[in-house]
Amino acid sequence: HGLYCPERLKSFCSDEHPLRPHIFSLANQAFQGILRHGESQTVLVSGESGSGKTETTKFVMQFLALAGADAVTSEIGRPLSRVERQVLRSNPVLEAFGNAKTLRNDNSSRFGKYIELQFGREDASWSKRLVGARIRTYLLEKVRVVDQLSGERSFHIFYQVLGAQAQADCAGGSCPMSP
């Protein structure tokens, strides 16, 4: 069992345990604040370059989406809603447009983001779940589009688009010959 596996996530889905040193515990404290007090909660993820801010943010979002759907707290957890699936799938798109290879990190975020997850009652049920999200980006490192240091690259999206085009060309029979 890994540090971030589903079993570990499930072990943090209750309000019985005091705050333990794990990102799922912190996310659960925020979720319990929403459930018990109906108050907005803030989770600020900060750190040095390469410290895991992007990955940590993904784990917080995963916990909140799954806990709200009862996907980890009951045997018959409700399937994820369209909104919950979209929120969980949004990070790869953000990373493609805003992350780049730097000398210190192959997947370095070159932008900041403010993610607002909105919770509410989806139907007549008691529990709250993720019903919306808003993501704002800021401070995009625009100069990286046209200029990078030696050993660095532009944003991932450019290489992904070119790679997809090369695959399409090869599938169509016009693959350039290798030297």
Image (cartoon, rainbow, N blue to C red):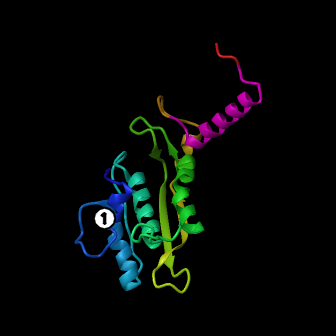
Say which amino acid is labelled 1: Ser
| Residue sitting at x 32%, y 59% | 8
Q: Main secondary structure of the magenta part?
A: helix
State whether residue 61 is above or below residue 39: above
Q: What residue lies at 52% left-to-right and 55% top-to-bottom? A: 91
**Residue 60 % position (x, y):** 40, 62
Q: Quadrant of the C terminus?
A: top right
Tell me the quarter of the picture where residue 155 sits: top right
Graded by Cα atoms within 10 Å as few (under 14), some (14 to 19) or many (20 or more), the crowding at tag 1 reads few
Q: Residue at x 29, y 76 (%)?
A: 15
Q: Secondary structure at mark 1?
A: helix
Of residues 17 and 1, the one drawn nearer to the viewer in this rendering: 1
Q: Which residues are magenta?
A: 153-176
- Report the number of numbered marks: 1
Viewed as shown, does residue 1 lie left or right of 123?
A: left
Q: Quadrant of residue 135?
A: bottom right
Report x, y in % for residue 106.
44, 38
Residue 6 is one of the magenta-drawn residues: no
Q: Which residue is mark 1?
A: 11
Q: Position of residue 138 (x, y in %)?
A: 52, 58
